[in-house]
Every structure is written in C-alpha cells, then in structure tokens.
Image: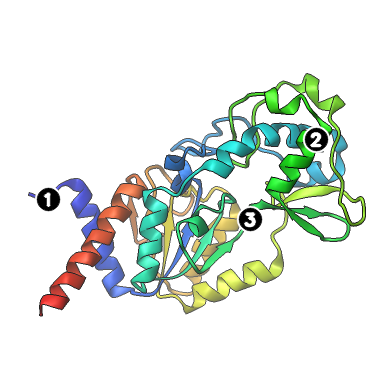
Amino acid sequence: MQTNLHIQADTLYRFIQLHPKLLVLTGAGVSLDSGIPTYRDENGVWLRGAPLQHYDFIQKEAVRKRYWARSFVGWPTISQAQPNAAHQALAKLEQFGVVDQLVTQNVDNLHQAAGHQQVIDLHGNLQRVVCLQCGAKITRAEQQERLAELNPLLPSLQAETRPDGDAALADDYFEQLDLPTCLVCSGVLMPDVVFFGGTLPVPRVEQSLAALQQADALLVVGSSLKVYSGYRFCVRAKDWGKPIILLNPGNTRADDLAQLHIRAACGEVLTELVECFFSQLNANCED
C-alpha cells in the first residue's frame, strides 16, 4: 500500500518525466533541517520580526554595528551547518540530468556544500564580505577574525540565530563596537548579499531568467514566494507557458499560478523522488 509520501514523490516523478529539464528555485524551507531558521511560518507571517533592510545597512553606521555584532554571534550556526536531505537530493537530481539550473534565494552556501554544480546565489552568499567603496572581497572567516581582534568581548556573547546570519542581541553593546574596514581602501564592509529591500544585480537576474527560458518547467522548493525576487520566476514562467510545481508545506504567493502544489516537507519528498529515479535506473540496467 502506498503512503502519502510515496504518492507525492510519484506525482513529482511523473511531472518530471513530462518536463525533464527543470529550473529549480529554492527558499529558506530547504535549509530549515540544517538548523538555519526561516523568516516566516507556514502562513507567511514573520517569525522573528522584520529582517534587516538593505539600505539601512548602507546608510547607517549604527545599523552596521548592530548587524556585525549580531552576525558575529550567529555566524557559527551558519558556518557549521551541514547540507540536509533536501540539498543532497537536489544535487543527486542534478547528476541525473533533471535539474538543469538551480537558483537559490538562500545565502548559506549549502547547495554548493552538497556538491551541486550549477547554482545561482540570487541574493548573494554569506561566505563573502565585500567593500562598498572599491569592491574588494574577503572571506567571512577573515571578517570573523578581525571582529574578534577588535572586540575581545564579542566571543563571549550568545543569542538566537536568524536566517541571514544575524542574531538577536540586546542593543546596549553595539555603540562600543569597533568595525573592521577594507584592507585596500578603508571603506565600509558588507556581507556579499542583498538584504530585504535591496536591488538584485541585473546580470544575475538576467542569467537566472535565461535559464528559465531554456527549462521545460519551474520547480519551487521551500519558498513562500512572498518576496518579488522569487515570485517573478513564477510570473515569467506563466507568461512563457512553462508549468509550475510547488513543493512547500504552507501557502505560497504563486498558488494560483501553479499546476500543482505538493504540501509537504521538501526533504522527505525529494529523497523519495531520488529513490524513484534509482529504481528506474536499476530497471533499465536489468533490461
């Protein structure tokens, strides 16, 4: 007797058989089982307050101090996180030739850590830090070391981690924080990501949409699509006549645009989907 999980995976498998070249768009739900929290609950409601705004970081030193203090505390959770079943399954599907391109809204580098080759980090990557003046880049690990050298009390602080590597800390420590500056030009340093309200680099968006044009269908995994940067892919897919399938336990902004919405935890369904492909490969070998 088939379980609901088997039925969901088989439904997705049959969809892929008809549309064998996928563009996959992933969101925060994919990294939840790696210990990285999501911004919203299944109904799209903020879980931990509104996130950092992009231009507040650029324009306000106090905001930058608050971010880097919190980020210092939250970084170990991000840097030590390991790919989970969903990341591993998507990497396997790429090896099978099913996932032609993966576009992620996440900034945690876990798809790459799982061995996925064709990844576009739509919102950037927390592993890098960039100078806003000259564009020079360093690793996030280097930034962590410099923050600790300038602020000896930072390593003793503890707090709950947020999805962007931030953490919830009281405000009284921030004013005293010494911030590292660019080693090349002494400019302001920022994580190499686009925070909420920021503008995505045009070449990155164009590359992602070009991949969607070449795909047979769009599979959205672990995203509520509340933010337009992700939702736009569903709008374009609809305009271009490409089927959309959603794998997310809660409602999404694109429910009315999709041909199918599988409401389930993405890791379990994707793992079972990989088993479907292995079974087919074994059957072909026996033939």
Q: Position of residue 239 (x, y in %)?
A: 50, 71
Can you identify the residue that label 1 sits on?
2
Q: Residues within 10 Å of mark 1 (few under 14, many from 20)?
A: few
Say what secondary structure mark 1 lies in.
Answer: loop
Q: Does dot 2 land on a helix, a strand or a loop? A: helix
Tell me what residue is drawn at x 42 percent, y 54 percent.
87
Q: Amino acid at mark 3?
A: His
Q: Residue drawn 36% across and 50% down?
A: 85
Query: Disc 2 designates what residue?
Result: 149
Residue 123 - label: 3
Residue 268 horizontal/vertical position (percent): 30, 48
Instruction: Please indicate, yes or no, whether residue 268 appears anywhere in the rendered image.
Output: yes
What's the residue type where badge 2 is placed?
Glu
Label 3, label 1: how many angstroms apart (C-alpha)? 39 Å
Above or below 23: residue 113: above
Q: Is residue 233 above or below residue 206?
A: above
Q: Which is more N-terminal, label 3 or label 2?
A: 3
